[in-house]
Image: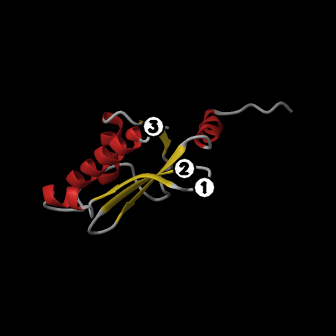
Amino acid sequence: RKFVMSTSLGALAQGDKLHRLLIFFSNRAVYAQVLRKVDNHIVAAASTTEKVLRVNLTNLGNKDAAASVGRIVAERSLAAGITAVHFDRPRGMRFHGKLRTLVDNMRVSGLQLN
């Protein structure tokens, strides 16, 4: 039989070539990292525990904090020469709230997510 590649398999194949986005939400903070696919080296990172972000935010774990982290990590990724990253939504995590705000702000800042 002839194998036909579906769009989801094509997206997975493309994701193997791109850098990977890792997002973590704790009760008190928001963390985001862009990892190199080959060796999982952290290329760009941002979190609300950094002094630059802590000064401007009243709450370090809400949507406003996620938006700030999304903008900062996108700017740092673009400065490192990364124009596109691959994001796999973790199982059981819905795409709304803080996650959606973070990802939308990354897109608005010019980073392409696949």
Crowd around label 1: few <14 · some 14–19 · many ≥20 (10 Å): few
- What's the distance in space between the residues labelled 3 and 1, CA to CA? 17 Å
The answer to whether one can see residue 103 in this image is no
- What's the distance in space between the residues labelled 1 and 2, CA to CA? 6 Å
Quadrant position of residue 48: bottom left
Q: What element carries label 1?
A: loop
**Contact, CB < 8 Å: mark 3 with mark 2?**
no
The answer to whether one can see residue 20 in this image is yes
Q: Which of marks 3 and 1 is nearer the N terminus?
A: 1
Crowd around label 3: few <14 · some 14–19 · many ≥20 (10 Å): few
Give x and y (percent) for residue 46: 34, 55
Q: Which numbered dot is residue 28?
A: none
**Mark 1: which amino acid?**
Asp
Tell us which disc is closer to us: 3 or 2: 3
Quadrant position of residue 47: bottom left
Residue bearing mark 3: 81
**Mark 3: which amino acid?**
Gly
Give x and y (percent) for residue 16: 62, 44
- Left or right: where does residue 114 sit relative to residue 45? right
Q: What element carries label 2?
A: loop
Viewer-closest of 91 and 22: 22
Give x and y (percent) for residue 103: 36, 44
Q: Which numbered dot is residue 36?
A: 2
Q: Which numbered dot is residue 39?
A: 1
Task: Give the residue at the far bottom of this rendering.
Answer: 27
Viewer-closest of 2 and 73: 73
**Contact, CB < 8 Å: mark 1 with mark 2?**
yes
Q: Is mark 3 on a helix, strand or loop?
A: loop
Task: Give the residue at the far right of this rendering.
Answer: 1
